């Protein structure tokens, strides 16, 4: 199979390419790049007016298989990922059973491979059953192909155990993806602790719930030499601490989710559980600090924390409904609309934070459009303005606060290993 992508604006952080060139793909690999390539191809895509970026890599997805297939399946999850522009995603281990051994890692990898769409890498849990008491078989899971460990959904509160896990991660040369939440400080909180939520009579989650564990984990990374990647950072002090850690030369990276850089508690529809996620939406000051942190490259990665739940699960009180929202099909448009169009990120930084940097976090050589690389590519139209419609999601999850929101920027094609894994039905003119 040969494919020629013509006239697109290529954004490739690896080679610092930011210009209109053509890309030629043969047998799943990028074999030629240049201006006005003259190659015979079985298929030609005219990408004029669109950005051609390395396929997006999401370090934070909940696929819910095994155990919660009513929320999402691997099949629906990878379809949603392909639609979102993703060629690689990392699946979090808070499933039923928890992914705490090599067998479950292999189960997910086999199932995902049989779908033949977005590549899935299964993250291993830190402790057995995510119980926080005994370490999981970290080495076994790494041998089975886990790119990282994480206790996502909670923090390992036993600091001694977490330090042991970090030592093993350092030995295995894999990062620890840290969900930062001091469970003893949560005290029944369901939304951010501020004046707006207090007026609604809802129990609050303070910034300290997140910040004390971020501080702890940075200190442990310093002692153990483990690579620490901070998940879903939501507070202004998280940015300050990551900045300091980097200044100290520590191997610390951080991700921000689209909901945290787009919405504050001021935007919440009271008692609508589609605004309930962990960490919660914070104040405007936090949102601005996250945006600045992304702009200044203190915050490295945009990840979705795609967390599908059923209508039934979400259709409960604010107290009872589970935390989490979907995000993998809306992240590119939100990043472009909220960060690029508003002047926080250049289009190149968008490619860095959605592909090149996440690849580096897991030590992967993807996230690049160099000649010789697997052809993992996303073609993104930055002109198209439209309304998000949750009923068009490929995900089983409909739990989004962004339904009906007007955004700009649309994924047109996703190519994974030279194979077209998503193609928008082209209707009419390019907007
Ligand atoms: N983010 C969430 O609100 N929920 C996640 C868990 C997590 O990412 O901590 C989930 O699994 O639903
Ligand atoms: Zn989490
Ligand atoms: Zn998560």
Image: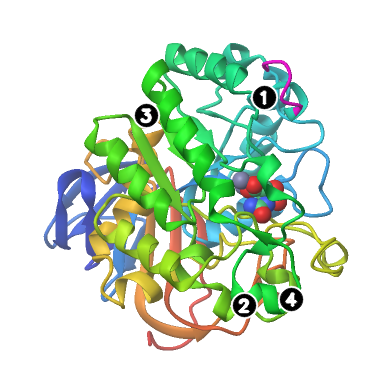
Q: Is residue 18 visible?
A: yes
Magenta stretch secondary structure, dominant: loop
Residue receiving disc 3: 363
Q: Is residue 7 magenta?
A: no
> Mark 2 sits on what residue?
196
Question: Is residue 135 magenta-colored?
Answer: yes
Give the residue drawn at x 68%, y 58%: 324
Q: Position of residue 299 (x, y in %)?
A: 34, 50
Q: CA distance from mark 4 to mark 3?
A: 39 Å
Contact (Cβ within 8 Å) of mark 4 with mark 3: no
For marks 3 and 1, give the CA distance. Answer: 20 Å
Residue 106: assigned label: 1
Question: x, y (%) of residue 335?
Answer: 41, 67
* In the image: residue 236, left or right of residue 17: right
Distance from Cα at disc 2 to Cα at disc 3: 42 Å
* Mark earlier in primary sequence (4, 3): 4
Above or below residue 401? Residue 102 is: above
Mark 4: give few (<14), some (14-19) or many (20+) Cα within 10 Å. Answer: some
């Amino acid at each position: 199979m040969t494919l020629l992508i013509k006239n697109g604006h290529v954004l490739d952080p690896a080679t610092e390419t930011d210009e209109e060139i053509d890309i030629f793909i043969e047998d799943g690999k990028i074999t030629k790049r240049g201006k006005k390539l003259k190659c015979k191809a079985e298929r030609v895509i005219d990408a004029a007016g669109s950005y051609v970026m390395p396929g997006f890599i999401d370090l934070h997805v909940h696929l819910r298989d095994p155990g919660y297939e009513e929320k999402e399946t691997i099949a629906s999850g990878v379809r949603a990922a392909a639609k979102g522009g993703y060629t690689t995603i990392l699946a979090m281990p808070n499933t039923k059973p928890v992914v705490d051994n090599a067998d479950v890692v292999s189960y997910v990898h086999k199932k995902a491979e049989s779908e033949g769409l977005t590549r899935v890498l299964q993250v291993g849990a830190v402790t057995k059953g995510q119980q926080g008491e005994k370490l999981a078989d970290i080495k076994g899971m790494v041998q089975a192909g886990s790119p990282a460990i994480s206790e996502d959904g909670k923090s390992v509160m036993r600091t001694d155990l977490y330090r042991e896990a970090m030592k093993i991660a350092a030995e295995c040369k894999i990062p620890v993806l840290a969900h930062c939440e001091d469970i003893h400080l949560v005290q029944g909180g369901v939304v951010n602790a501020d004046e707006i939520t207090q007026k609604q009579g809802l129990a609050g989650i303070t910034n300290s719930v997140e910040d004390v564990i971020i501080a702890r984990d940075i200190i442990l990374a310093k002692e153990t030499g483990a690579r620490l990647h901070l998940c879903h950072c939501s507070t202004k002090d998280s940015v300050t601490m990551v900045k300091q850690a980097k200044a100290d030369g520590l191997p610390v990276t951080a991700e921000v989710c689209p909901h945290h850089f787009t919405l504050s508690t001021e935007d919440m529809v009271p008692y609508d559980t589609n605004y309930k996620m962990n960490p919660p939406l914070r104040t405007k000051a936090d949102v601005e600090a996250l945006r600045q942190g992304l702009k200044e490259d203190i915050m490295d990665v945009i990840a979705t924390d795609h967390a599908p739940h059923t209508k039934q699960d979400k259709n409960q009180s604010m107290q009872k409904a589970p935390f989490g929202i979907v995000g993998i099909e809306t992240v590119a448009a939100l990043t472009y609309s909220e960060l690029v169009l508003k002047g926080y990120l250049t289009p190149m930084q968008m490619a860095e934070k959605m592909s090149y940097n996440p690849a580096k976090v897991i030590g992967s050589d993807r996230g690049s459009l160099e000649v010789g690389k697997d052809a993992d590519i996303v073609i993104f139209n930055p002109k198209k303005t439209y309304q998000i419609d949750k009923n068009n999601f490929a995900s089983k999850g409909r739990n989004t606060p962004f339904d009906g929101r007007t955004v700009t920027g649309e994924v047109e094609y996703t190519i994974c290993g030279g194979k077209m894994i998503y193609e928008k039905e082209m209707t009419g003119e390019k907007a």
